[in-house]
Image (cartoon, rainbow, N blue to C red):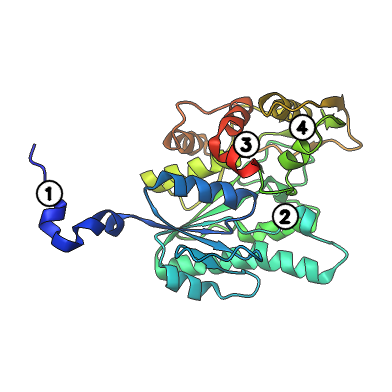
């Protein structure tokens, strides 16, 4: 087999040949629960030209790949033109604990960020021809029935769930991956995992009538990588589901076991059962996403929590 010396052929530009052919990935919202994991995962790969955004005070950086950006006030089009990405992963969102339903400004902000901003990204993807991955949520459903599929009626009863519906509308160049996610955050955080880890040596309750079949932020990062690496985009809404369903009590038990936390968890029923579990009408594509992410089978939730706890990225985030 004949090999080519690209450095010799291209001359002084040969040293930059890898950079020239690298896909540029823009990760929006690199300091939240999802964005922290996704950005660190892609930076660790070293296979892509990665650009990140942050709006948090004190997070400004002299690094050329980090852009200060606030989706609530800054124009997305100017950012896209500046970065010129091949792929965009949107990790920006207003989560449920940050929404005050008694405050109209808080409600408007949630709608702007969770609904209008993803729609603006969709329009930009169409114009600038980049592919766009949008995380969806199980909270667009009330949780009264469970095993929701892509065509199920979205019957969210709170502002958060309703605000996410608009942002999950399918569009050309856009792949919506809907899943509930858990993962580590920097600092105290507001995530379920960080709250749990802060309760060491305490006694807490775990609901056996709250059912869950979500994924980890590490799962999502690997899924996004697999989509980009294999160019697997259906331009449809896809529910991403693991192999099984567990109760929130069992999920907390997995946290306890694999993050090695000294805590007592009481298995109890709640005042109202909740079942926001997802199913899919496109099981083949669900399985393909897992395979392209490097999994040799669709993993169980326990396997995913074990992987998350053992991940050096998770340890770095929590350190």
Circle 1 or circle 4, nearest the eye: 1
In x, y percent, where is residue 139? 72, 48
In x, y percent, where is residue 74? 59, 75
**Does 33 sit above or below residue 67?**
above
Mark 2 and mark 1 lie on one chain; the one further toward the N terminus is 1
Give the labeled residue for mark 4.
248
Q: Give how far apart the Cα atoms at labels 1 and 4 are.
A: 56 Å
Q: Give how far apart the Cα atoms at labels 2 and 1 are.
A: 51 Å
Residue 99 visible somewhere in the drawing: yes
Task: Please report the residue visible at 28 percent of the width from the left and 56 percent of the height from the top.
Answer: 21
Q: Are marks 3 and 2 in contact (CB under 8 Å)?
A: no
Give the labeled residue for mark 3.
279
**Does 278 sit above or below residue 22?**
above
Residue 183 visible somewhere in the drawing: no
Q: Which mark is residue 26?
A: none
Element carrying mark 4: helix
**Does 282 sit above or below residue 115?**
above
Q: Do the residues labelled 4 and 3 touch (CB within 8 Å)?
A: no
Mark 1 and mark 4 lie on one chain; the one further toward the N terminus is 1
Q: Which mark is residue 5?
A: 1
Q: Is residue 26 left or right of residue 165?
A: left
Task: Please report the residue visible at 39 percent of the width from the left and 60 percent of the height from the top.
Answer: 86
Q: Residue furthest left?
A: 2
Give the labeled residue for mark 2.
95
Circle 2 or circle 1, nearest the eye: 1
Q: Do the residues labelled 1 and 4 touch (CB within 8 Å)?
A: no
Q: Give how far apart the Cα atoms at labels 4 and 3 are.
A: 18 Å
Q: Do the residues labelled 2 and 1 touch (CB within 8 Å)?
A: no
Q: Which residue lies furthest to the right in this view?
A: 271
Circle 3 or circle 1, nearest the eye: 1
């Amino acid at each position: 087999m004949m090999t080519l010396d690209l450095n010799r052929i291209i001359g002084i530009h040969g040293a930059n040949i890898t950079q020239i052919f690298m896909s540029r990935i823009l990760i929006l919202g690199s300091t939240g629960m999802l964005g922290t994991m996704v950005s660190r995962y892609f930076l660790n790969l070293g296979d892509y030209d990665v650009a990140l955004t942050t709006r948090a005070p004190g997070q400004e950086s002299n690094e050329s790949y980090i852009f200060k950006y606030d989706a609530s006030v800054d124009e997305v089009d100017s950012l896209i033109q500046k970065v010129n990405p091949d792929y965009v992963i949107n990790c920006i969102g207003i989560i449920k604990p940050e929404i005050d339903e008694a405050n109209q400004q808080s409600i408007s902000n949630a709608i702007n960020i969770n609904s209008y901003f993803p729609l603006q990204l969709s329009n930009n993807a169409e114009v600038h021809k980049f592919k766009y991955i949008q995380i969806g949520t199980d909270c667009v459903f009330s949780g009264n029935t469970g095993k929701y599929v892509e065509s199920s009626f979205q019957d969210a009863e709170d502002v958060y769930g309703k605000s996410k519906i608009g942002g999950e509308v399918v569009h050309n160049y856009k792949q919506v991956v809907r899943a509930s996610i858990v993962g580590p955050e920097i600092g105290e955080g507001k995530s379920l995992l960080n709250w749990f880890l802060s309760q060491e040596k305490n006694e807490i309750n775990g609901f056996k009538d709250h059912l869950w079949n979500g994924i980890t932020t590490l799962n999502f990062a690997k899924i996004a990588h697999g989509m980009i690496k294999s160019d697997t985009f259906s331009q449809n809404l896809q529910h991403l589901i693991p192999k099984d369903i567990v109760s929130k009590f069992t999920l907390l038990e997995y946290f306890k076991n694999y993050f090695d936390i000294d805590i007592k968890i009481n298995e109890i029923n709640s005042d109202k059962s909740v079942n926001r579990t997802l199913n899919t009408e496109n099981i083949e594509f669900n399985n393909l996403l897992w395979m392209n992410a490097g999994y040799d089978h669709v993993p169980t939730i326990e396997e995913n929590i074990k992987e998350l706890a053992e991940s050096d990225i998770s340890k770095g985030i929590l350190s």
